[in-house]
Image (cartoon, grey):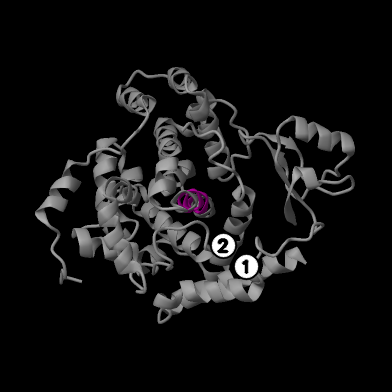
Amino acid sequence: MNTSPRQPSKEIQKRIRRIRGLPTLPPVVQKISDMVKSEKVSAEKIGKTIGQDYALTAKVLRLVNSAFYGLGGRVSSITNAVVLLGFNVVRGVVLSASVFELMDRGIVGLWEHSLGTAIASGVVAKALYVPEPETVSVAGLLHDIGKVVVPVKMPEIYKKILDIIEGSTLSIGEAERQVLAFDHSRIGMWLADEWNFPPNLTEPIVYHHTPQLAKEAKIQTAIVHLADILIRAKGFGFGGDPWVPEINTEAWNLLGFSMKELEEVVFEVGEELFNVDGIDWRDDTPS
Amino acid sequence: MQRILLEKAREGMTLAKPVVNDNGITLVREGTELTRTLIERLVSLGIQNIIVQGHPLETDGETEKPLSVLEKEMEDRFRPTQSNPLMQQLKEIFLKELRSWAEKEE
C-alpha cells in the first residue's frame, strides 16, 4: 500500500488543486448554497428560488420521491421538501439533480450507482432506526461526487486510470491513487468543504472506503459504506470498476446486523430498486 | 411482475405496483385492475410505463438475461474478495435474491 509506483507529475497535482468546484453548475445551485449559509433563510424562500427553474424543480421532486425510501410519494413541492427533509438534504438533492448529467457524461452508470446507493442507505438507516435517515440517503446520493471531476475535467488522465483498471482486479480508487497519488474520496472532501457540508454528509463522502476513520458521523459513514457495497453487488448502475468492494470489519461490527437481518435489507433494497429502474432521468434535461 | 410500456397495456391486467407521475405522486394504487378508461386516462397523463402482475408480455430476450448468465456475473463481481468469508455470505444472499426474482418472473 505504501509503495507509490507512479509519482503524479507536478502538472497534474497543480491542475487538481485548482479544481474547487464542479464545472457548469447552474447559478441557482450557488444561490441556494449561499442562502443556506445565512441563518435567516426560510423554506418558502428556498422553494421560490428553486421553483424559478422548472426543469430543476421537476427533477428535484422526482429525486426526492424516489431516492428517499419510505416517504411514499407525498412530497409535491420544494417548500414541502425543505420542511420535511431540511435544508442540507434539499441542498444535496439540488446539487445531485444539477450534476447528474455530468455524472453520466463522465462515467456512464454513475448516476444510477449514486441513486441506488441513496436508496440502499435509506433502507439500512431505517432498519437501524438511525435518526434523520434522509440525511444518510443524501450522503449516499453524493458519496461518489469526487468521481465526476477527473473524467469531465481531465479526460486524458481518466483514460490512464481506465487503462489500469482494464484487465486487472483493481478498484477505481486504487487506479486513481496510482495515477494521481490520491483518489475520489479526497476530491470529494474538497467539494464538500467548498459546499460547507456538515460532518454527517462530509464524512460518508470522504470515508466511504475507509469508514474506520470517520469521527463524528461513524454510523452514517458505515451505512453508506455498506450501501455502496450492496449496490455494487446488485449490479445496479456502474461505479467505475466491476468489483464489489470488501466490507470493512469495524464498520460491519458497528452496524451489528445478523445475516438474517442483512438478507432482509438486501431483499428490501431489491424491491426499492425495481421501483426506480426504468425511470428516465434524461428526458427533461436542458441541453 | 413485469414492467411494460403503457401502449402494451390491456384491459384485465392488474397493477403490481402503483402508478406514479413524474413527481413521484401516486395516481393509481397497486392491485387495481386495468380498464380501457383507466388506460386512456394514464395515456392522457403522459405515463409511459407501468408494472403489472405476472409476465403477460413476451420479452425479446435482449432486455432480460437468463438466470445462469446473471449468476455468472454475480460470481464475477465477487471474484476479488472470494477469500473473505463475510463477502462469500453476502454473495450467497444476493444469489438467493436473484433467484427469487427469477421465480417471480415465471
Tell me the subunit letter for badge 2: A
The reply to whether callout 2 and callout 1 are in contact (CB within 8 Å) is yes
Question: Residue A182 location in percent, x, y?
Answer: 21, 58
Q: Quadrant of residue A28?
A: top left
User: Of residues A267 and A11, which is closer to you in this image?
Assistant: A11
The amino acid on which the numbered mark 1 sits, given as a three-letter code, is Glu
Residue A27 - label = none
The amino acid on which the numbered mark 2 sits, given as a three-letter code, is Val
Judge the density around disc 2: few (<14), some (14-19), many (≥20) Cα neighbours within 10 Å.
Answer: many
Give the Cα separation between the discs numbered 2 and 1: 8 Å
In the rendered view, tell whether residue B42 sits above or below residue A139: above
Question: Residue A244 location in percent, x, y?
Answer: 43, 67
Question: Residue A52 location in percent, x, y?
Answer: 47, 19
**Residue range corresponding to the magenta coloring:** A113-121
- Which residue is identified by label 2? A266
In the rendered view, tell whether residue A31 sits above or below residue A275: above
Residue B97 - label = 1
Question: Left or right: B39 with respect to A217?
Answer: right
